Image (tube, rainbow, N blue to C red):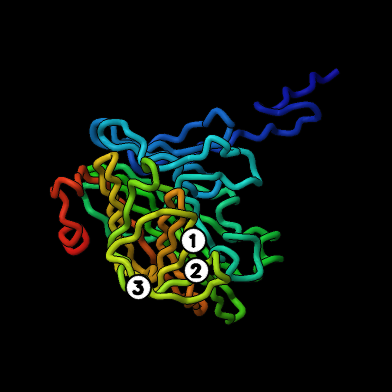
Amino acid sequence: MATPAPAPAGAGAGGAAAASPSPPPQLPSPYAELVKSPSGLEKIILRGARNCCAEVYLYGGQVTSWKNDNGEELLFLSNKAIFKPPKAIRGGIPICFPQFGTHGNLEQHGFARNRFWSIDNDPPPLPVNPAIKAFVDLILRPSEEDLKIWPHSFEFRLRVALGPSGDLSLTSRIRNTNIDGRPFSYTFAYHTYFFVSDISEVRVEGLETMDYLDNLKAKERFTEQGDAIVFESEVDKVYLSAPSKIAIIDHEKKKTFVVTKEGLPDAEYKNMLCVEPAAVEKPITLKPGEEWKGRLALSAVPSSYCSGQLDPLKVLQG
């Protein structure tokens, strides 16, 4: 009787070959590490000089932590934040796309913030500061379910980078990949939650004389009258054609956040404090093949407005 031939290596019952696990995604930066969070969701940790670091979840493409060289947390994350899809993570820097707020027919703030993004191992070239070593590139493409609620094909590329001095930047590139010749329009925001002291100790510089829509008054339009924005009650406003730099001055913490934005003409702020570089009033329209780029850069500098160590004009114009 002939002896049966041995099953090929890796064959299971019935001789079917066992599938080998796919290799883990490669990160382009040795200063970036892919880990699993206690919730089981994957996140990337970016490590800068001294104790500077940032954390980016693949779920939502969302930055949830940004710490300075003293290890001090600079972003607010709610203690009630739920790290369980499909719930959006409350805090950090959610990505609002393809809709900001209720400015459209989709769910509030769109769907990008509660989708799983992928690490982009081969992104198109993006000019960067060669001193930046800690970064990660992510990409989001629509699923079949997404196309049912928003019938447009797109590629959303996001680079999160930690600069040598601890500055944090997010660069978004959105491309229309429709093959049927249709343009699409969207609104967008980086929904940034800053970790500040008592809100009564905070003021915002750079939005003086700007027109704004008051979301607490049915989006009625007003003009800002004060020489700075201070907080005495709940606030939810969208400032139109805001300047490229906005300063958030925290008297109690003796710290100033400088928000620099490109490609994002508007800014919203709430009472947490959220200051959100956005494109709200005029939706962005892309023809097939066209790409839009928007960038947010955040820095935090020691300051003491009361003692005269901070000149807001130098911060905003420097």
Quarter of image, res 53: top left
Image side of residue 42 versus residue 68, left or right: right
Secondary element at tag 1:
strand
Q: How many residues crowd mark 2 within 10 Å: few (<14), some (14–19), many (20+)?
A: some
Measure the C-alpha gap from mark 2 to mark 1: 6 Å
In the image, residue 269 lies at what x, y percent?
Answer: 43, 59
Q: As shown in the figure, which amino acid type bears the numbered disc 1? A: Asp
Name the residue rendered at 51%, 39% in the picture. 78
Which residue appears at 43% of the width and 55% of the height? 158
Residue type at tag 3 = Met
Return the residue at label 3. 210
What element does badge 3 sit on? loop
Where residue 85 appears, x then y in whole percent?
64, 43
CB under 8 Å between callouts 3 and 2? no
The residue identified by callout 1 is: 236
> Which mark identifies residue 214?
2
